[in-house]
Amino acid sequence: MLEIKNLHARIAEDGTEIIRGLNLTVKAGEVAAIMGPNGSGKSTLSYILSGREDYEVTEGDILYNGESILDLDPAERASKGIFLAFQYPVEIPGVATMQFLKVAMNEQRKARGEEELTTPDFIRRVKEAAAELKIDPAMLRRPLNVGFSGGEKKRAEILQMALLEPKLCILDETDSGLDIDALKIVADGVNALKSPDRAVIVITHYQRLLEYIVPDTVHVLYKGQVIRSGDKDLALELEANGYADIIGKAA
Amino acid sequence: MNIHTPIRLTPAETALVETYTAQVGDLPGDGAVTVTRDRLLNDIKTSGLPTRRVEAWHYTDLRTLLRNVPAPLAAAPSLATIAPLVEGAQVLPVLHGAVDAATSIDGVEVASFADSLVNGTAAAGLAALDKDDAIGKINGSLVRDGYSIAIPAGSTVEAPIELQALHGAGQVHTRFPVTFGAGSRATFIERHRSATGEAALVSSISDIMLEEGAEAVWIILQEQGAEDTHLGQVRVKFGTDSKLRLFVINAGGKLVRQELRIDVDGEGSELTLRGVNLLGGETHTDVTLVLGHNVPNTNSTEIFRNVVFDRARGVFQGMIRVAPDAQKTDAKMACNTLLLTDDGEFSVKPELEIFADDVICGHGATVSDIDNNHLYYLQSRGIPENKARAMLVNAFVAEVVEELEDEKLVEALEGVISAWLEKHA
């Protein structure tokens, strides 16, 4: 589903290289965890996958279902099924949450040549998904993410993911700032989306989230490269020994 | 300026003088009114229109910007009313300045303003507010008609009243004295719109009097044509414990000055002023507020949101004066601008003159572009860039519209805003 080949990327504004020859393959149905110390390029990778303009790809390619997505803007990538759940979702005053959800769902449907949702159908879908994630309906009446707690923002991201039904879900540090109950709710939400035609990339610092969202593969990112890949036991090894060992061996 | 050396009149000033000379014979009014008209016109003739050297007109040099004034039409164009902004509103038509005095609204006293010119009761109110009151002078010398309206004490008018001012080419000068009787409640929509798109000079003054405990909502929706000059003025006097929500939307016009001259003279009274300026094309739009908190224990908040496209220029001047004995005044003013092009311009001049010592007064102004993080977030959910931009611009102004509470009104104004943005963004 996703193939990243020798990817090099830098911050557009100052030219700082962050991703330095990264290779990664994620298959449909797979849950891949990306771990790594601070500053290894984890969040940058998620932004580049989603098409954020602040980064420039200088070499290599990203293939999604066999096609390069480098020339697509974030909206086009989203319509093709790529979804990034942000570590820090932004607050947008004046944009009503429900209106935002409706526009996003319908714009994606339009881009794919599908019928737009009717209002009753839309409301039913939102209600059901919100109930699953134990989201207070009052939250949905507020402007987008405005005044939401950290945990509410993360849940709102998963709600969007559930409604938009993406094929490639990227979760950037979705566990940060969540207490254990919220973590379980979010993990259940992600697990409910698992399917043979959908891949999930979980970016995290800690093993904790991976107890609830069990990965098929684990990849260690360091200085913009994948320096080691393995199965879920690799995450346990990292938890026990830290990154120093692996970094030492790779160097 | 020395009175022995008359200035050389600009083409626009000449046209105003000629308009007056040609019309003076049939402008309505008794002797007192005619004397006032003569004096006002003579002021324009001897000192000219204000220039940037006049502080109140520093950012809108009327003498330079008003290049020409179209001659009045020999016969008024035939215009028809349009659907009201809000369904169920009661429309008082003002078609190219002509009112329909036969229009009646249940429980509201409506008369032609021309009547009070003819019988002379309008003479005192016709004077300019001060020596720099160019709008008062132009309107006072040339005004023909309008509506005099009174909401009887204690009554509540449920449906909004729409003053529907439509015009064709030429000139229109109207005035609307409206008294809200003690304890009365009503909503007015003052709507200005070009019916034909041909150039016109429009001056319009609304004279609002709030008696004790009255609660009023007054909305000005200005959607003049791209060739129009619109000179608007609202004068407000507050009685004890009265409340006014004043909402101004500018979404048209070539040269626009909307003045808000407000005196808070009643203790316990409250002003909520909100405004949206949607500026595109080559417009020059100026909103000037002069707000006097003249007695103790009064509140006001003023929030303006401006959106600037193309080569548009905008001005907001906000003067708040707190009189020496107006203790416990609470006044807050904010002016936020979204500047979306390099060629656009917005000038903000907040001024606080505070002579009392126990008050809360503040003002703030911001100028920004669309936040790229917001744009990226919306795009990352599949919303195309142009649509995402429109949503963010809409959000920026929608925040103040939503404060209006009346759902039908909010929906109607949001409709006006989205339609404007679709055309200009």
Image: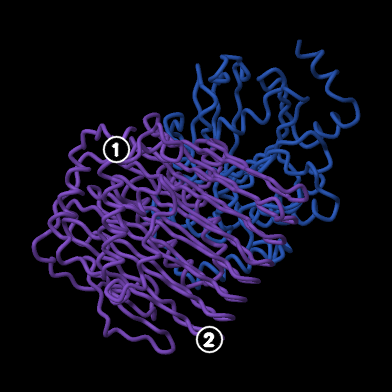
Q: Colour of chain A?
A: blue
Q: Is residue A171 left or right of residue B209?
A: right
- x, y (%) of residue B38? 26, 55
Q: Is residue B421 left or right of residue B351?
A: left
Please identify the residue farthest to the front as the structure is shown: B4
- x, y (%) of residue B308? 41, 41
Q: Residue at x 14, y 64 (%)?
A: B25
Q: Is residue B113 left or right of residue B327?
A: left
Count the marks.
2
Q: Are marks 2 and 1 in contact (CB under 8 Å)?
A: no
Q: Where does label 2 land, which residue? A: B155
- x, y (%) of residue B281? 30, 41
Q: B355 or B380: nearer the eye?
A: B355
Please identify the residue farthest to the top as the structure is shown: A251
- Label 2 secondary element: loop
Q: A132 or B47: nearer the eye?
A: B47
- Label 1 secondary element: helix
Q: Where does label 1 land, which residue? A: B63
Report the amino acid beneath label 2: Ser
Report the amino acid beneath label 1: Arg
Density class for disc 1 (Cα within 10 Å; few <14, some 14-19, many ≥20) is: some
* Callout 2: chain: B
Q: Residue at x 35, y 65 (%)?
A: B191
Can residue B318 be seen by looking at this rendering?
A: yes
Colour scheme of the rendered structure: by chain
Q: Residue at x 34, y 65 (%)?
A: B175
Density class for disc 2 (Cα within 10 Å; few <14, some 14-19, many ≥20) is: some
